[in-house]
Image (cartoon, helix red, strand yellow):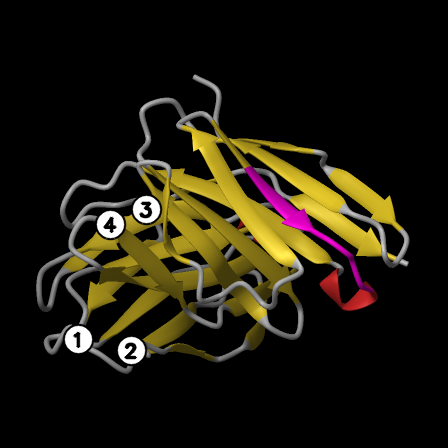
Amino acid sequence: GQQVMQIPQYQHVQEGEDFTTYCNSSTTLSNIQWYKQRPGGHPVFLIQLVKSGEVKKQKRLTFQFGEAKKNSSLHITATQTTDVGTYFCAGPNHTGTASKLTFGTGTRLQVTL
Amino acid sequence: DAGVIQSPRHEVTEMGQEVTLRCKPISGHNSLFWYRQTMMRGLELLIYFNNNVPIDDSGMPEDRFSAKMPNASFSTLKIQPSEPRDSAVYFCASSLFLSDYNEQFFGPGTRLTVL
């Protein structure tokens, strides 16, 4: 079945440093979604990328979808303590009339002053 | 607009007891998902429904787990009998399946502890 892996599993940075998490799928994806889960919270949707090579920005966050639509990355510039949490990528798996998401293994980000 | 509602938020029970988790999806959404999250196994999809019909239950760990969706506004996940290894956070999520756009909205989760 479809597998989605993320690296690194964990990263600890000083506030102000940059951070990148990478996502790789075993199959070609029609789109990729990113979610953020704060400690003790639930996953919250951040963004969806659809086109090959697409790049989208949300303030300090930059999301990229690979040309082959099998990988993606999330880059955070100048991290802040509010960026703490686990970041998940997720790829859809359609059955025709319905769709589920396969979530990646997640990257936990810790930011300290 | 209320988001996905789950109850209870916390549940502590003893091994062998029956546990029922409840979920109310966002009104108008046609897909509902049950996930389990643990440190060891991450976020696992247990089962999902589309238009109240179970589509894929391949993630349900064993026969002790069952899920129902009697109508578009309510779903339950039942564990009978419960075991300590079932301790986890259980999330319910809903979405409106529209072709390729299917953002999922998660509830706050139920933290289950089986002693």
The chain under label 2 reads: A
State the residue lying farthest toward the top.
B1
Query: Which residues, given as a range, are shown in magenta?
Result: B76-83
Which mark identifies residue A28? 1
x and y percentages locating residue A34 in the rendered image: 35, 56
| Badges 3 and 2, same chain | yes
Q: Residue at x 10, y 75 (%)?
A: A67
Instruction: Please tell me whether mark 1 sits on a helix, a strand or a loop.
Output: loop
Mark pair 4, 2: CA separation: 20 Å
| Badges 1 and 2, same chain | yes
According to the picture, the residue beneath numbered tag 2 turns out to be A25
Q: Earlier in the sequence, mark 3 or mark 1?
A: 1
Q: Earlier in the sequence, mark 3 or mark 2?
A: 2
Q: Amino acid at mark 1?
A: Thr
The chain under label 4 reads: A
Mark pair 3, 2: CA separation: 26 Å
Mark pair 4, 3: CA separation: 33 Å
Q: Amino acid at mark 2?
A: Ser
x and y percentages locating residue A77 in the rendered image: 39, 61
Which quarter of the figure is the C terminus of chain A placed in?
bottom right
